Image (cartoon, grey):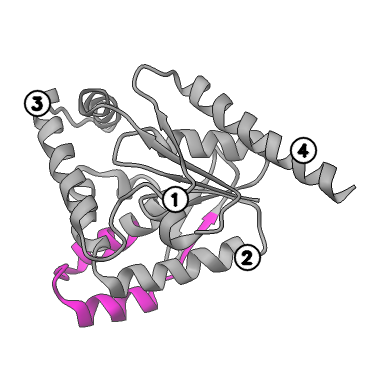
Amino acid sequence: MIIAIDGPAGSGKSSTARAVAARLGITYLDTGAMYRAITLKCLRLGISSQDTEALAKLTSQTVISFTGVPPESRIWMDGEDVSTQIRSDEVTRNVSDYCAPSVVREALVKQQREIGKNNSVVCEGRDIATVVFPDADLKIYMVASVEERARRRQKDFENLGVHKSIEELKEEISLRDHKDSTRKNSPLQKAAGAEELDTTGMTLESQIEYIVNKATALIQAKSAVAK
């Protein structure tokens, strides 16, 4: 089974996807973390998001993998645990620019599809149901108000020791929404057949329960047909 969860930054995708994977006992494929890892590496090496040749070479030579089961999942880049570093403010501000070039997206989408071939996965990002897994068994498009997403981002940053105002975060989120929805390659959009889930005001547990119940119903339906 493949569960595809898409939506804009701060809509609750990552936390929900991790928990759904843990609840169902299947792989959590964090595509956003893969793009963040590439962004981190580029920033470290001083590679511009406009340098297509360098980006293509770097992405093809970068080994990204996941270990552990949520909530203990870790992401590794070239043998280094970068689970914390990829969530930095600098990476967050630049990831949209580095994930836009087609050379980066094509290479990582290929890796993602390979993982999904032989595993049941919960996968979240911005083009999962539209590009990566268009035939996913369950497609969810998560949304939330900009105010709500800014509050969530503020809490995340505070946990990292970074302090930002709600207004500053709202501006950053709006800019990222614009970049993600207007980019030429795999823009953020609701996939055909996807169910929209507005998480504004919803608790994390209610988000998890909603998707787990949907997935469980599909599994039961498939099992009944197989019999």
**Magenta range:** 37-66
Alpha carbons under labels 3 and 2: distance apart: 42 Å
Q: Is residue 166 left or right of residue 218?
A: left
Q: Residues within 10 Å of mark 1 (few under 14, many from 20)?
A: few
Alpha carbons under labels 1 and 3: distance apart: 33 Å
Q: Earlier in the sequence, mark 4 or mark 3?
A: 3
- Image point 20% across, 43% down: which residue? 89
- Image point 22% across, 65% down: which residue? 184
Q: Residue 192 bears which disc, if any? A: 1
In what element is the residue under mark 3? helix
Image position of 159 with respect to 32: above or below: above
Which residue is farthest right? 227
Q: Earlier in the sequence, mark 1 or mark 2?
A: 2
Amino acid type of the residue that numbered disc 4 sits on in the rendered structure:
Gln
Asked which quadrant contains residue 202, the reply is: top left
User: What residue is shown with label 2?
Assistant: 117
Mark 4 or 1, closer to the camera = 1
Asked which quadrant contains residue 88, the reply is: top left
Amino acid type of the residue that numbered disc 1 sits on in the rendered structure:
Ala
Mark 4 or 3, closer to the camera = 4
Q: Earlier in the sequence, mark 3 or mark 2?
A: 2
In what element is the residue under mark 1? loop
Q: Earlier in the sequence, mark 4 or mark 1?
A: 1
Check contact, mark 4 vs mark 1: CB within 8 A: no
- Image point 37% across, 72% down: which residue? 106
In what element is the residue under mark 2? helix
Q: Residue 69: within the magenta?
A: no
